[in-house]
Amino acid sequence: MFSRRTIAAFLFTVTVALGVSCGKQETATPAGPVWKPSGNEGNVTGVISFTGAVPAPSKLDMSNDSKCEGENFLDDVVVKDGKLQNVFVYVKSGLPQAAFETPTNDVTLDQKGCKYVPRVLGIQTGQPLRIVNSDTTNHNIHPVPKVNREWNESQLAGQGPIIRKFSKPEVMIPVKCNQHSWMMAHIAVLSHPFFAVSDASGAFTIKGLPPGEYEIEAWHERYGAKTAKIKVAEKTDAKADFTFDGSVAYQPGSLKAQPAMMIP
Amino acid sequence: MSEEIQALPQIKKPATFIGKYVFSRDHKIIGLQYFFLALAAALAGTLMSLLIRLRLAWPQERWPLLEMIFPNGFSDGLMKPEFYLAMVTMHGTMMVFMVLSVAPQSAFGNYFLPIQIGAREMVFPRLNMLSFWLTFASFVVLIAALFVAGGAPIGGWTFYPPLSAIASAGPGQGAGADLWLVSIGVFCLAAFLGSINFIVTTLTRRTKGMSLMRMPLTCWGWFTTACISLLAFPVLLVAGLLLFLDRNFGMSFFKPAGLVVTGQVIEGGGGSPLLWQHLFWFFGHPEVYLVIIPVMGVISHVMATFARKPVFGHRAMVTAMLAIGALGFLIWGHHMFVSGMNPRLGLAFSVLTLVIGVPSAVKTFNWLGTLWGARIRFTTPMLFAIGFVSLFVSGGVTGLVLGQMALDMVFHDTYFVTGHFHMVMGVAAVFGIFAATYYWFPKMFGRMMNETMGKLHFWLTFAGVYAIFVPFHLLGIAGHPRRYADTLWFDFLKPLEPLHIFITIAAFVTAAAQLIFAGNFLLSLRKGARAGDNPWEATTLEWTVATPPPMENFAGRLPVVHRGPYEYSTPGAAKDYSMQTESLD
Amino acid sequence: MKICELKLVIHSPLPTPHSPPPLPTLMSRLLAIAIWLTAIVTAGLFAWSKWRLPESVAAHSAMIDHQFKITLAVIGVGFLLAHAALGYVVWRYRAKDGERASPSQGNARVEFILAGCVAVVFIALAITGQRVWARLRLNQAPPGAVQIEAVAQQFVWNFRYPGPDGKFGRTDPRLYRDADNSIGARPGPLGLDPNDPLGKDDIVTPTLVAPANRPISLSLLSKDVIHDFYVPALRMKQDAVPGMKINIHFTATREGRYEIACAELCGQFHHQMRAYLDVKSPRDYEEWLKKNGKQ
Ligand code: HEM
Ligand SMILES: [Cu+2]
Ligand SMILES: [Cu+2]
């Protein structure tokens, strides 16, 4: 009799323990009918402009790791001829209720010269992210998502690629290397393929959008997000240009820290 | 008198296999269960230490075979630093909790305390069974931490927050750390319940004539340790609970305001990381004594038997044990000299730390005094007992360095500390466990262990542990911080690499030598020479009962004790030993 | 009662005749030699000059080294005496056929005297050790010490200088911006409030630049978990605890570049948390300040 009670106590403990570990597991996103292009889609193109003073490029101090080769200038704001690079543009709302096929080709995030290449990238849920270390030093890749499961993994010099996936849509996930604190990338995870990153001339193209009205958003690491409403007619391209103003840099709110305890 | 004995209620004998060997209430079976649990944990802990050693010796080597076993710990054959730290954490936890807090106290204590004081059972047999199964559950949960997403925690066995309070602070600090906390919480509960049983049994179930001072020193060790456990484990239990609340329920006992981990602001504030350290070490320092005190008891016991001599200064030995147990609660701060604790506070902790060296030194004298004028029989358990004294001295003296704040500032968190505690609590206690195993194996299993294999095991292990852990000190003097996954990054560490390679080779040889023990154990279980009831010609009550002891130990008749525990070589006696049950005439 | 005992004796079969373990002499000799050898080799390794404390450039290190030497001598003597005695009893008191051990139960007088001696030695050590500590840590930095702040984070050290005004500007955790760690960056990794005039001239660098032969007062802080400011060449170690500001001070006596490590487990790259201490001549130091403080 007592043995049954003991078994119960034991099982309870194990269940609690496993519950703790499994509670954090994610469930897969629900699927609707699979979306198929019908041939009457259009593209959205646009250019990101930049006004105001371009911040002077700061030279990062990499002296605590002699294996970080070359020089490294902060490249969060890359402006050429008044056009802004590395702006992430995507369809925020208005898409039909459907599941979009998961691409099997991978998206690469390289670590080169102790810097992420590219700095901003988009990926679909379930699509493989291939992380490469081209440096002779050790990195860790530490995305800090709010919705997806957080992970943190080292990638040593000479180690092959790491393949990871994100299971839920999330814009944006900051990615950091704790060893090289300046390293910073942003990953956008979307359930659909309608996104793009502005290139060196500030231009972007979102391909193959079905006819309809959409809200699209342009996001920049330093200057925040801007949205626009657009309409895609059958087999026609739509245009969406954005302008970011360099004089209103995004400022997070302030946190009141308690005064530090003093020890002589 | 005999009526009184007859009046004792009969304990119902369990009929089924499960009742007899699995959910048994017999203290001897429970002792064996603890013993085998500790052996399993020791195996796991040793394998982990070998993985640690592999990376330290050859940090850039690729181990594709190991990657097949630990797909998450290796990548392209390279051991990841987070896996290294997970192994360090799990090795430390395994060894400190599952091996050293279990084997000397719960395993041998459960088996022999009732017999040595002349009791038929523990006072609370069901509670005893519950303690074991809770400990077992805790072991399972700890192992489970290896297999969750992110792997086992990397915060070290001391589990300092905020690193351990924030899931994003490192791989393994998510589910793995939660499981670690659950495991340790359950373990604390089990140890606490077990200690109640030990204390009450010792105080109320001694047989006629078994005064406190006639108890063997083993019983004193188990009793003192139970008292320490009673006070220390609840503190860790509560601290662990608070940390669990911090992690999962938005509390902030250990997190100050304004923490930013990997660019993310951690909400909460008002907590103190030092609070954990105070709570942890208030448990943690007594913990090292609750490991070593039962071992000290065993060593005195074994030594008296094979020295054929009474223990030198029996009363002083008891006093020293109690003094160490009590003082052990007042010196936790010596782990925190450079933690940010007010530096003035360290003054008191430092003096008390060196003061606790005095009873430890007294014990050492008395072991030497016991051997002085002895007629030593060099059996395997005796070799391990003598080896223990050597290790205890070697590990103890470096405590005098670490107990001084200015020197601790140099050696804190270097391999000097690792060397110190491996010597004085790690392998010294393991030597005690070996001595106890070789000594009581005949009683527990009815057969003798093979002496030749035993001696070979001793020689290799004795040489091996010195070869491993003396160089640890040298690394520490050269400034090598502990919990470092390799020596590649710092110029001042690079010259130390050859020493790491030497240590790793020594560790593998020493670990391989343990196979001799395993082989001896298994072989002797089946083929060993049959042991009589008192093969060592010892005096205490466990040697008066049949081998192996029957259910209820004394076949319904409790023994009556007439003598102290260690009456060897009494002048004029016929034999050179007088059993405690022999009347004085 | 008698019956009960009698039964017990009858119940247990006579003890197996004891066969003492073979080769008692050989074992005793071997073990004694092993104990002595181990002790000598161990003591020798500790005494061997190859395993010394790292070279030091701190003004206070002579004090520490002296205390370490005294302590090593004391524990060395204790260690060797204990092992000499252990080897001796093992050598001398092996089992011999037909001989009995001495029945001595102890000697309280000897015990008290020995314990007293040990207590005196240990407490003397504690007291001398405390004097060293007191001189290091129980006093304030001398006036005129160079004020520097060290702020740790996974797995980087940041150092901040107050600039010509001698005052540190306000910082805010919400403003931390690791992405730009260049010297003039605002808010930079330490979250300098751009609106605080006191912070305008603050200098933040990943290298600790310090003038030689001038007392340095260093305040230790942490952004995330506990770290430990550890400079082997300074004989110095102190935790940097989030939520606390811990002040230490030291004087570096020789110019050069020394490694700063982290000595409190802080995450997977704990073993790579390196920065440099760059000790410059006072002239070079002033020049460095001027060059970097302009922004
Ligand atoms: C085969 C024998 C053993 C070897 C080779 C070994 C090796 C090691 C190594 C290399 C470390 C890491 C040191 C560091 O970086 O801090 C370590 C840590 C540790 N070991 Fe052992 N060890 C052995 C046996 C034991 C035993 C018997 C104990 C029991 C007390 C023990 C307890 C610990 C503890 C508590 C830690 C600290 C873990 C932490 O830092 O959280 N070890 N061991
Ligand atoms: Cu990196
Ligand atoms: Cu650190």
Image: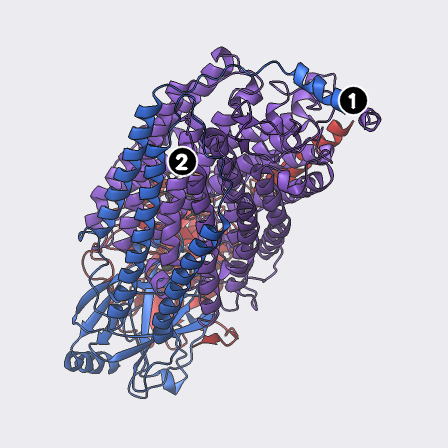
Chain colours: A red, B purple, C blue
The reply to whether the C-beta atoms of the residues labelled 2 and 1 are less than 8 Å apart is no
In the figure, A48 relative to B180: above or below? below
In this view of the protein, which residue sits in the foreground, C264 or B262? C264
- Residue labelled 1 has its Cβ within 8 Å of some atom of ligand 1: no
Q: Is residue A182 left or right of residue B248?
A: left
Measured as percent of width and height from the top left, residue C201 is found at 31, 83
Which chain letter goes with mark 2?
B
**Residue designated by label 1:** B12
- Spot the residue most to the bottom: C165
Q: Residue furthest front?
A: B572
Mark positioned earlier in the residue sequence (2 or 1): 1
Residue with the mark numbered 2: B386
The answer to whether C34 is drawn above or below residue C145 in the figure is above
Image region (quadrant) for ligand 2? bottom left
Residue at image position (51%, 16%) is B525
Q: Nearer the viewer, residue A170 or A204?
A: A170
Query: Can residue C247 be seen in the rendering of this structure?
Result: yes
> In this rendering, is residue B291 above or below C118?
above
User: Is any part of residue A81 visible from this angle?
Assistant: no
The kind of residue tagged 2 is Ile
Q: Whole-percent x and y of residue B222?
A: 59, 40
Residue B266 at x, y = what percent?
51, 62
| Residue C122, quarter of picture | bottom left
Count all numbered tags in the image, as a single digit: 2
Amino acid type, callout 1: Lys
Q: x and y percent of residue B346 in the render?
A: 45, 67
Residue drawn at point x = 20 percent, y = 62 percent: C55
Crowding around mark 1 (Cα neighbors within 10 Å: few <14, some 14 to 19, many 20+) is few
Please check whether the numbered discs 2 and 1 fall on a single chain: yes
The residue nearer to you, when weighing B228 against B335, is: B228
